[in-house]
Amino acid sequence: MKLFWMELASPIPMKRTCFLLLCFLWNMLFPCNFNQDAHLRCQMIPNSMSVLEKKGDIILGGLFSLHDMVEEQSLSFTSQPPKIKCTRFNFRTFRWMQTMIFAIEEINKEGKLLPNMTIGYKIYDSCSTPHQALKAAIELTGNENNSEFEQKILSNSICKESVPVVIGDGGSTQSLVVAHFLGVFTVPQISYFSSCACLSDKNEFPAFLRTMPSDFFQVEALVQLVKHFGWTWVGVIAGDDAYGRNGANIFANEVTKFGVCIAFYEIIPKNRQQTKILHIISRIRLSRAKVILLFAVEQDAAALFDEVQRSDLTGIQWLASEAWSTAAVLSNSRKYHHILQGTVGFAIQRADIPGLQDFLLSVHLSKLDAHKNPLLVSFWEEVFQCSLGAQTEYQEHEAESKPPCSGKEDLRSVTNIYSDVSQLRISYNVYKAVYAVASALKALKSCVKGEGPFFQKSCADPDKILPWQLLHYLKHVQYLNSFEDEITFDDNGDPTAVYDLVNWQMNTDEEIMFVNIGKFDGMATSDKQKLHIHDEIIFWNGNTTRVPLSICSTICPPGTRKAMRPNFPVCCYDCVACMPGDISNISDAIECTPCPPQYWSNSKRTTCIPKHVEFLSFTDTMGITLVVISLFGSVSTCSVVLIFFCHRTTPIVRANNSELSFLLLFSLTLCFLCSLTFIGQPSKWSCMLRHTAFGISFVLCISCILGKTIVVLIAFKATLPGSNIGKWFGPAPQKAIVLICTLAQVIICTVWLLVAPPAPRELMSREKAFVILLCDEGSYIAFTLVLSYLGLLAFICLLLAFLARKLPDSFNEARLITFSMLIFCVVWIAFIPAYISSPGKYATVTEVFAILASSYGLLGCIFAPKCYMILLRPEKNTRKNMMLKVSSSKQ
């Protein structure tokens, strides 16, 4: 214990000290048995981890997940640690391990890269679990040069032979645990399959390198692919591990920056619970997404596709992450063909390694030793389903159920993933990792004394290589292998990111083929140069030209805009037609664009067209009707003139002051005709004419009526005895009244035209599809004066006519004038609110109607009775009859 506290006080880095404490606690919980005679000298627990090893001048550590699952008993505080059983042997991973051995033997055999040095290996099975990977890493990092305190703690649990570098592990989750541990001791780790972007953090993992590109580049490639085909509604399914979760999260974050929506995000549980996977199937159906990214290892992918196949879920365009984009376990199974045909994914570059297949098939029963090669024994028994009689931790529960091996088994007679060298991708990564170490060792051995990279330009001791020295050379390795592929690492320990775009296509034998249809170069400068598709893609529907659509909502055509659905992603929207006056001339418009004030949208809301100019036209139904009524009134007035002219000598014409009658008829004709100036397209002259003609014509008309009313009153007064008033109101004074009253209106109109004349004006409302063209009054004061003056004369005339209503009938026009003026006043009083409230051209229609109605009222009330008597009752149109009426009136 004294030694323990002394070691804590020593200047050991804090992380190293913490780890030593962890090891001390580990040994307290799991006491180890040390057997000097056994080949597997270092046993952490009774059922020790099997190791495949070979001696050499330098030993490379290896971690491979040769089994996919681990079965272990529940932990309990007893003298015996829990037994661990690795299950589901993985032939593909075993091929990777054999590739490492092949590369090492190739280097040793050639002797060009490392002359006078042999490489050995020590390889462990991590069983696809983090804690097994950590246990293997602890086994690999034993060091005879540990301090006295370290020896006391590690002597019973860690082998005395240490490795300066570890190649592995495959899974990102295992590599995360191992990298944390190896980083404490600066032992370089080169992973051949761990792609998690998190491993690029050199602060967390200073000794981690890899020949597998980071998921960051894979995600970038997938995002470019989604953008290329215009998919905006994509489902994401991830495995429940560091690889799946980190990759899927990066993809979801990056792809949404380009307007793509995530239809759903689901996790495949590691226990592959059926209810959870069925829930994922349900989410796929409900989302209606046609493109789904599966970011998971092949074991998780197989568990998902088993349920997809049972649920008969088809019509999905699957996007494969690198981990299963070339998985033979999926492509070789015919039950998946109808599901996975057309799958598109990215895979790391492949290579044909000469001599590898012969090496893989060279494994034979005669070379197997249950003690020296326990992993090879497990492989042999799994391939041929027989028993060699050896009891390893993998077979101790299964040997009884298998027949004994005959010794005649031959790997060349078996076709499986192990011997398939058509898709050497991860195997090539393992191959490159070994050659990277060999190249770094060559550079280390070639160091010239006094020119080294370490303190005081020293070199490393080739006979006693320290891990951190080898890490330095690995970081700066640059080696061009026989495939013209440069092996190098960037500042994050990542290789150059180059992917093949792989399409799962069915051949004539109904077998799935991995067809290389493109390439993604992560080092290219522009996005267009990064993704290159050089061949046709066959999608899930067997079509090469029709790209499957994966959208939450249909594309909104021009003339519509997107309307977001509440509580839905931005890709889910409804297409809403643009409002009148707004347009959208592109698909999937976010907003409609308002047309300029003088323009309006067409019926399809795709372009702006000039607004229809609206005014009271001669071609309108309303215009034609008013023209007919106006002309009929003018013709009627002219007919009355003709009747009066033909019967000008008759008493009824002469008794009603024929001169004023003819002048009144003339002014009524002008009133009817002036209404025509309000019809047609307004112009500068028509606007000035219509208001002045209206004002002057009606004042002339009312002046004549006023003159006739005064004449009636004077004529009656003049018949009284002793009255001489009649001489003051002869023809000349009557004409003077008409002239003065009319002249006043002329003066008002003249000033109006000089100061602020009426002019055409366009009313352009944003809410209306037409431009209202009308005459602006120019001066509302002048317009009010014209109407007010007209109203004043009409009121005086009405008053005088009302006073003269009981005069003798033969002389009396007052009663008729009273009715006519009542109609006139009612019409124009009603005109004011109707004019103000009428929109557009209907205001003009209202004014024309008022003109015609008042004109017809005057014509009908004043002249219709006279024409009736002249034409239909001529016997009463005599002087005698007229005098009799006068006499009866006096009595």
Image (spheres, rainbow, N blue to C red):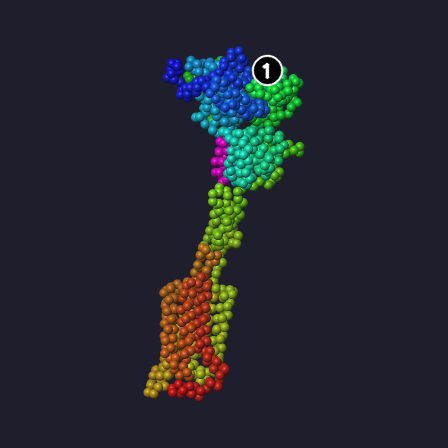
* Tag 1: amino acid: Asp
Q: Residues within 10 Å of mark 1 (few under 14, many from 20)?
A: some
Residue 226 position, x and y percent, is 53, 37
In this view, 590 is above or below 117? below
Q: Is residue 203 magenta?
A: no
Which residue is disc 1 drawn over?
369
Q: Which image quadrant is residue 823 in? A: bottom left
Residue 39 position, x and y percent, is 54, 13
Q: Which residues are magenta?
A: 245-261
Side (left or right) of 539 relative to 153: right
Side (left or right) of 717 relative to 402: left
Residue 624 position, x and y percent, is 51, 67
Which quarter of the rendered picture does the C terminus lie within?
Answer: bottom left
Q: Which image quadrant is residue 739 in? A: bottom left
| Residue at screen point 50% across, 45% down | 573
| Residue at screen point 44% across, 87% down | 881
Which quarter of the rendered picture does the N terminus lie within?
Answer: top left
| Residue at screen point 38% across, 75% down | 798
| Residue at screen point 45% across, 65% down | 844
Q: Tell me if I can see residue 879 in this picture.
A: no
Q: Tell me if I can see residue 18 in this picture.
A: yes
